[in-house]
Image: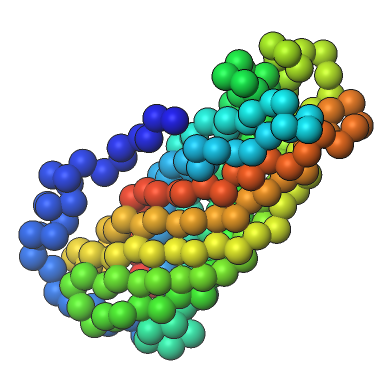
C-alpha cells in the first residue's frame, strides 16, 4: 500500500527552531487539536471464504479533531473524532468494494515534559469503529456486503511543540486494533483484520 507523506521535514524543522515560550499544561486545561491523519491498514488483512480470497484494504486521509482534558499537569483524557474514512477493498488483487468508517477513540495520555517547548506524550485506550456505506463491485457486484462494528484497543504517541501564547503544533502516531466480521448476502464469510497505523499532523489551542 502507498503511504502518504503529510508533514515535510522542512515544516517540522521550522516548528522546532521557532522561538516560543515554554507554557505549562495544568489540571483543568482543555486542548483542542485539528489536523489530518492517514489511516493505513496493515499489509496483510487476512482471508475470506475459507482462505480462498486474500483481502487488502487501502489507506485514506481525512481531517481529524482531538479534544484532551488535562486531569493533572501530566495526565490527560483524549477523544479522537474525524469525518468518515473511505477504504477500497481488494480481493485477490481485484477491487471488490469499499466501505466508510468512523473510529472514535478514547485514550488516557501521559505527558513527559508538560513545561517544555517540546512536550512528548504516550497514551493507551479503547476504540469503537462504526462501518457504513458498504459498496460492492467486480467479483462482489450485486451482492449485499456488511461489515460489523468493532471494539478494540489503541495505543498513541506524539509530541506537541509550543508556539506563541496558547497555540501548539504537533505530530502523532496511533495503532488501533480493528477486526470486523464480514458477511455477503447475509452469509458469514470471515473476519478482516484491518489493524491500521494512523499518523498525522495538527495545530491546536489550549483553553
x, y percentage for residue 65? 48, 54
Q: Nearer the viewer, residue 73 or 8?
A: 8
Task: Report if residue 32 is visible in the image.
Answer: no
Which residue is at 17% across, 45% downward? Answer: 9
x, y percentage for residue 191? 73, 42
Q: Nearer the viewer, residue 100 or 177?
A: 177
Q: Quadrant of the C terminus?
A: bottom left
Which residue is at 43% across, 88% downward? Answer: 72
Which residue is at 49% across, 64% downward? Answer: 155
Q: Quadrant of residue 204?
A: bottom left
Is 135 placed above or below 63 here? above
Q: Nearer the viewer, residue 41 or 202?
A: 41
Q: Quadrant of residue 15?
A: bottom left
Q: Nearer the viewer, residue 68 or 177?
A: 177
Image color mode: rainbow
Q: Quadrant of the N terminus?
A: top left
x, y percentage for residue 185? 89, 26
Is 30 placed above or below 183 here? below
Is 131 placed above or below 128 here? above
Which residue is at 91% across, 32% downward? Answer: 186
Task: Report if residue 7 is visible in the image.
Answer: yes
Is 78 placed above or below 17 here? below
Amino acid at each position: 500500500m502507498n503511504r502518504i507523506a503529510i508533514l515535510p521535514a522542512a515544516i517540522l524543522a521550522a516548528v522546532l527552531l521557532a522561538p516560543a515560550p515554554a507554557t505549562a499544561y495544568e489540571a483543568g486545561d482543555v486542548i483542542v487539536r485539528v489536523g489530518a491523519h492517514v489511516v493505513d491498514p496493515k499489509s496483510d488483512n487476512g482471508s475470506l471464504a475459507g482462505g480462498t480470497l486474500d483481502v487488502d484494504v487501502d489507506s485514506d486521509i481525512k481531517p481529524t479533531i482531538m479534544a484532551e482534558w488535562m486531569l493533572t499537569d501530566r495526565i490527560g483524557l483524549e477523544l479522537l473524532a474525524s469525518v468518515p474514512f473511505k477504504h477500497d477493498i481488494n480481493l485477490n488483487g481485484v477491487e471488490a468494494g469499499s466501505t466508510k468508517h468512523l473510529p472514535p477513540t478514547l485514550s488516557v495520555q501521559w505527558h513527559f515534559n508538560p513545561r517544555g517547548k517540546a512536550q512528548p506524550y504516550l497514551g493507551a485506550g479503547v476504540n469503537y469503529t462504526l462501518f457504513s456505506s458498504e459498496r460492492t463491485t467486480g467479483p462482489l457486484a450485486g451482492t449485499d456486503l456488511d461489515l460489523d462494528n468493532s471494539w478494540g484497543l489503541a495505543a498513541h504517541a506524539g509530541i506537541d511543540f509550543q508556539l506563541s501564547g496558547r497555540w501548539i503544533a504537533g505530530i502523532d502516531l496511533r495503532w488501533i486494533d480493528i477486526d470486523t466480521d464480514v458477511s455477503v448476502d447475509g452469509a458469514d464469510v470471515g473476519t478482516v483484520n484491518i489493524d491500521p497505523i494512523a499518523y498525522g499532523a495538527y495545530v491546536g489551542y489550549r483553553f
